[in-house]
Amino acid sequence: MKLINLKIIKNGIYGNPAPRDFHLYYVLYGSAQIEEGNNVLPLETGEMLVINPGESVTLKCENGTVLQCRISHSEVLRLMGYQRKVIVCNTHLVKNENTDELRRVLGSLVRSYYEPDQNLIEREQYSLSLVYLLIAHFSNNVFAENDESRKNEIASYIEANYADEVTLEMIADEFGLTPQYFSRYFSNVFHTSFLKYLNHVRLEHAVDDLLNTKETVLRIAVNHGFANVASFNREFQNVYHTTPGSYRQTHGSEQEKIEKDDILSILNEKTDEKADETVRINLHMEGNYPLLKKYWTEILNCGSFEMMMKSRMSEQVTFLNDTLKFRKARLYLDTFSADGRHHFYTADRVMEFFVRNHMDLIIVIDYRSLGNEELFISYFREQCLRFANRFGTGIQDHTVFEIEYRTKYDNEKLAAFASFYEKISDILRQCRFDSEIIGPSVLVDESGENFRRFVKAVPSIRTYTIFCAPYTFQEKGSEVFINRLTDAGYVLEQYRTACRILAEEKRDDASVLIVSWKDRLNDIDVLNETVWMGARIIRNVLEGYGICSCLPLDLPLDLLFDEASYERTFNLLPGIITSSGIIKPSYHALKLLDQQDEYLAAVTKDYLATKSADPGYVQILVHNCKKPGYGYYTREILDQTSDYQADLFEDSRPAAYEIRIDGLEEGDYLLKTRIVNDESGCAFTRYLNMKYTDDSFVGKGEREYLKAASVIPVTGETLHVKEDGILNIKCTLAANEFRHLHLIKVRR
């Protein structure tokens, strides 16, 4: 059986009732619609949609031409070791790097169909690449309750092996059961006999081929596990009351001819050619440039008031404030107690700390965790009066309150939130706070409809807050599916979705603010300690420059976690500083961003270049951030230091940079270079090289050694610029390396 079959559908309506296989639809020309129940999914030229096995749909392409890729579910199950997957891919809603790569591989696959037969290996390669992309970047596991898990495992095994010689005894042995017990179990759970179920699966697959391919009836029978044509005809006659040949004539749709020139004009003949891997930077030192906006240090998430009282917490926050110059601190108000014993002293101490450090505040109220709302309102009024009386305008004019409410909204929840919002607003007015109320720090779902419901219900808010994460949720009827996101640009995508919703709701008076972002499925992740996280921060910051107003890390300090639970030197937590004060590459990323010159010369997702008012000073920050691959996303959790040695990335190729700077004065220049990679500025890899079998061997001396290992070394090189004012610099970065180049004119 082929892994993928291609078919062209033109100008008509085509039903696809409960297919056994995956179907990818790609609109080549015009437009199409996929109807699934009451949902109508529109598709325009160049857009793709995947339908999963068992999802009944109707395709309407009355004014379009659609390429259908039928992907064998059985073969996918074989490749995945019988693990069921659901694929979520609709490029009408989401377009990103992953969908671009999917389109490129699809173009290569279609092109391979026009090559001579000796290129069947190449065709198979592109088929596997297409399935790999769908599984690695667009799929989620299908989970079942415990009592359904064995049933699903058996069904998956049969689905994957039905075309072979499969017997009841073989499957019973596969699952460690006796044939007698398995036979009874199968009848009770599937409500039919094993043989009838097996023949039903074989017949449904055979019918798909009968209608969608030009294979002979004999080949279809053999390909799908029937001993001969006679047994296939007999089984077919019992179910459909006609012969396979007659059924094909009555129900089959004629395969449209695939015109190579027409298709490739859409898919692009060069889509399978890799772009030049060299990044070229051209900088002109003459002219006026805008000021650099350091939006990445706008907000520092500090946990909560109670967390700020932990040992070393104020010390590390002070360090970050001094070295990175954050403007605002954001922390949760958790000094409220349902028993009435509120922690006013803690709130006063923490407030004094931030006033002393000249940081404005965003105080977050978690609406979901309040419990007794009436008691909280009473407490909040008293707390605001204490703040006003003790700190006056120093707090009243420099504090924003955020009401967080992360949930799937319905009318009842929205009405309750709106009422609470008004109560908080009244208290702030009474206490003379010149404070905006923002919220709800929601995760924007794939379509943005959950966020839209909130915007409609709470129009009083002027700044809508969101948090960004590498997952989102999708509503399908009464069910909600959590979708993993593997595209590097998900932060910007979620931000743009929220902005689009505001525009569609004609909320020109409102804006979107990202209050936190995280780049991991689990907080415990070995990559948190590595250079990859630093490179990832740089990439996200550069990609969002000029678009987002703020990009604060969700959990910037390991101290924000329960210290008693994490006692190792490196706990694989997401902070940029460890609990014991060891600097991580992610800190270096923010520091190198922060020390840039005042004027922006150039920015792309690959590099940032800045200059000072003096043309003799230039800074360039470059990176080679790699995309985690299937090896990373198939691991539920990476909680061992040894996991870093695993194959976690799609590739490990170096990146070449060629930098050309013109408009410089003639003379000598010093080029300072700071490099952060596995060998330089990364204490974690130095720790791995120590090869201690037990963290208890790490004493005070070793910790000081690791702190020293986290410092970025600096090298210098003198370069000469001739009369033409041009300087060329070349460098090659290892996987996930980032590098800071600082050019300084030597004054004589």
Image (spheres, helix red, strand yellow):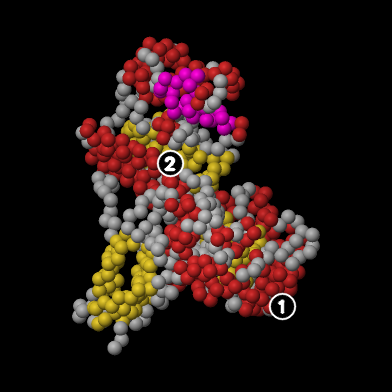
Q: Quadrant of the N terminus?
A: top left
Q: Is residue 237 left or right of residue 744?
A: right
Quadrant location of the C terminus in the rendered image: bottom left
Task: Identify the residue shown where x is 43% and y is 46%.
Answer: 631
| For residue 280, above or below residue 291 | above
Q: Amino acid at mark 2?
A: Ile
- The residue where tag 2 is placed is 135
The tag on residue 201 is: none
Q: Is residue 154 on the magenta stretch?
A: yes
Say above or below: 696 vs 410.
Answer: below
Residue behind mark 1: 390
Span colored in magenta: 148-171
Which type of secondary structure does the marked residue at label 2 adopt?
A: helix
Height in image: 122 above or below 393?
Answer: above
Looking at this view, is 472 or 228 the one in front?
Answer: 228
Q: Is residue 334 left or right of residue 567?
A: right
Residue visible at 38% across and 67% down? 675
- Nearer to the camera, 695 or 468: 695
**Where is residue 355 drawn, in percent x and y?**
63, 77
Locate residue 432, reporting x and y percent. 69, 74
- Which quadrant of the figure has residue 135? top left
